[in-house]
Image (spheres, rainbow, N blue to C red):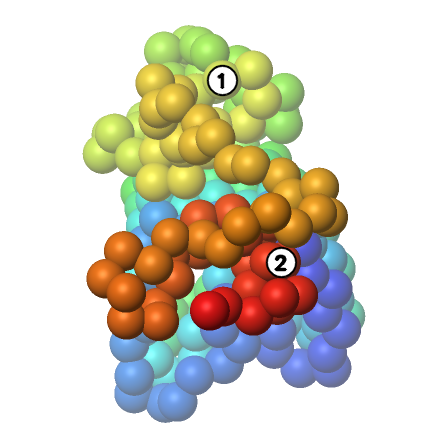
Amino acid sequence: GVDKAFINYESYAAAFVGLGRSGTTANIDACYVGQDVYITAYSAGAFRGASKDMTTNVSNCYTLATLTSKGGTYGLVPYVWGHLNISNSYNGNGPIVSDTNSYQVTITDCYQTVDGGVNTGAITVAAEKMKGADVFTAADKMPALNANDRFVAGEGFPILKAFVKDSGEEPEQVEVWGGQSDVSAPVDSDSDGVYEITKGSELAYIIKNGAS
């Protein structure tokens, strides 16, 4: 995911891929662009600036970024002049697609806060309807988004499971070095001159006194 970025470009720009080589395919899955990302371009995209003479597949993704277009096109993949397939994804701050140029576009189980102005097939709902623990169960929210069980609902916007830490894990206990050195050298278990450093004060001893 991309949490923080500021991009300003004259042509096609995105947090992930601007414009790829003609005839190629880009597969983007389980990725996100956070709300502290700002992209300004002729074609401002979250995941790809344009799908031009190429194929772009986006699945299980979301963006909350601020996308500002200098040419009227913005969204997950705003400018389509090729093949675009987007599924189980949402834009919490704009459209999925805003310009298709009548090329092949398939959008399945996707949600947006702004109608892109073209027949994209994405469902338009208010941003507040994209939030809450009931976002996958309430009929007026995003019930089709989590068909692949890749998202987790909470108080705010749903996030990807891949980026959620197991709450049952015990946090690792880390000793913070107070700036002092040990009064004796650390352990040299094999008597080979190699010392096992386990904390900052032991390293400080080696640096200050050397090992003997």
Residue position for label 1: 154
Q: Position of residue 167 (x, y in %)?
A: 39, 21
Q: Where is residue 11 in the image (x, y as percent from the top left)?
A: 67, 82
> How far apart are the two marked residues, 1 and 2, measured between alpha carbons?
45 Å
N-term mark: 1 or 2: 1
Label 1 Cα crowd, 10 Å radius (few <14 / some 14-19 / many 20+): few
Vertically, is 201 above or below 166?
below
Q: What residue type is labelled 2?
A: Ala
Between 67 and 198, the residue placed more toward the observer is: 198
Residue sticking out furthest to the front: 212
Q: Position of residue 196 (x, y in %)?
A: 37, 57
Vertically, is 40 above or below 21?
above
Between 60 and 201, the residue placed more toward the observer is: 201
Q: Where is residue 85 in the image (x, y as percent from the top left)?
A: 31, 58
Q: What residue type is labelled 1?
A: Gly
Q: Can residue 179 be seen in this view?
A: yes
User: Residue 145 bears which disc, if any?
Assistant: none
- The secondary element bearing badge 1 is classed as loop
Label 2 Cα crowd, 10 Å radius (few <14 / some 14-19 / many 20+): some
Vertically, is 72 above or below 59?
below
- The secondary element bearing badge 2 is classed as helix
Tell whether label 2 touches label 1 (CB within 8 Å). no
User: Residue 204 bears which disc, if any?
Assistant: 2
Left of 24 or right of it: where is 179?
A: right
The residue under the point 53% across, 76% down is 18
